[in-house]
Image (cartoon, helix red, strand yellow):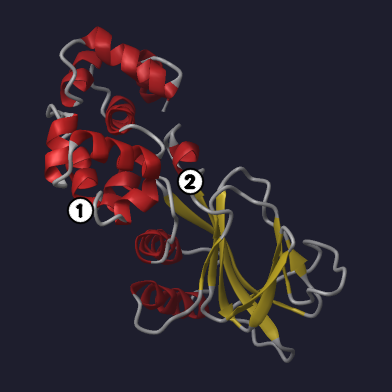
Amino acid sequence: MNAVNQLFAPLKLEANVFHNGQYCGAWAIDVSGTDKMTFHVVVRGNCYLKISDRTIKLSQGDAVFFPRDSQHIVTNLPDQEVEVNSAESQPMLTLLTEPSTGLVCGNFRHQHPLFERITRQLPEVILVRRNAGSASSRIIDLVLEESASSGDESSVLLNRLSDCLFLFIVRDHLDVESGLFAAMSHPKLIPAMALLHSAPDQKIGLEQLANEVHMSRSAFSTLFKSVVGQSPMDYLKQWRITLAYRWLVDEGISTYEAALRCGYESESSFSKAFTSVMGFGPGKARAELKQS
């Protein structure tokens, strides 16, 4: 499993496609304001994305993701004022005589308090142009095919394809200069990130990480912090607690067992680390299991 999959697996990120239809005439939509990561895939025709002070033309096969629920408008008339969310979309299977734009729109549910901390490192908008031959374009082709053949507003296949599309986009298209995602593609940090993620129950020290990338401890520590924004040991603690939250909520394991799985020698030291990262104790996480 590569680092991107490892990172997102405990977050339980799931796509929820809520629109699979086409617009014609004058139209404009704004689906922001849900406090969720949202996305659009243009499956037919053309349209325009208006975000901040930018206007970006989108064509069939283009996909846009908004990691922080940024306010935006998608429209077919970028230079005219069109009442937002007033036009009704038509099912994809409906034959229209006018030119239309088909959109698959959705958002992502997640089940982890640290999700926003991670997506905060992503850009305001991720735009991926259709590019024949890339892995994400092959997924987009499947989205286009399923959108055109499905009569449902949403479908299980569209949801799962959207999950895959986002992971491929993060892995293959995201170009950031700093932060966690930059570290995952940094040639000198890739081995260290793999080691940090590989065995949360094992003792991993700064010297071991530095040796993994053939650097001195001080040089490695400086590079890691300059890219990720955290020290290697602080990041390791956050990663272990990210996993521990998932185990406590999903499996209902004891705090002591969670501590052992995370490489802590005592329940008290684990509880202290858990609270410092999450802002609440492991007991509250276990309570979420009982409420579900």
Q: Earlier in the sequence, mark 2 or mark 1?
A: 1
Query: Horizontal placement of 18 versus 149: left or right?
Result: right
Query: Horizontal placement of 166 versus 89: left or right?
Result: left
Nearer to the camera, 203 or 222: 222
Query: Horizontal placement of 67 versus 131: left or right?
Result: right
Nearer to the camera, 134 or 216: 216
Q: Secondary structure at mark 1?
A: loop
* Mark 2 and mark 1 residues within 8 Å of each other at the beta carbon: no
Quadrant housing residue 125: bottom right
Q: Residues within 10 Å of mark 2 (few under 14, many from 20)?
A: some
Residue at the top extreme of this rendering: 268
Mark 2–mark 1 Cα distance, whole angstroms, equals 22 Å
Query: Horizontal placement of 270 versus 114: left or right?
Result: left
Figure check: 96 above or below 91 = below
Residue 12: in sight, yes or no?
no
Q: Position of residue 82 (x, y in %)?
A: 85, 68
Q: Position of residue 101 (x, y in %)?
A: 66, 79
The amino acid on which the numbered mark 1 sits, given as a three-letter code, is Met
Residue 92: in sight, yes or no?
yes
The amino acid on which the numbered mark 2 sits, given as a three-letter code, is Gln
The residue sitting at 15% across, 14% down in the picture is: 265
The residue sitting at 42% across, 50% down in the picture is: 14
Dot label at residue 1: 1
Quickly name the residue at label 2: 121
Q: Position of residue 192 (x, y in %)?
A: 20, 44
Quadrant housing residue 157: bottom left
Between circles 2 and 1, the one closer to the viewer is: 2
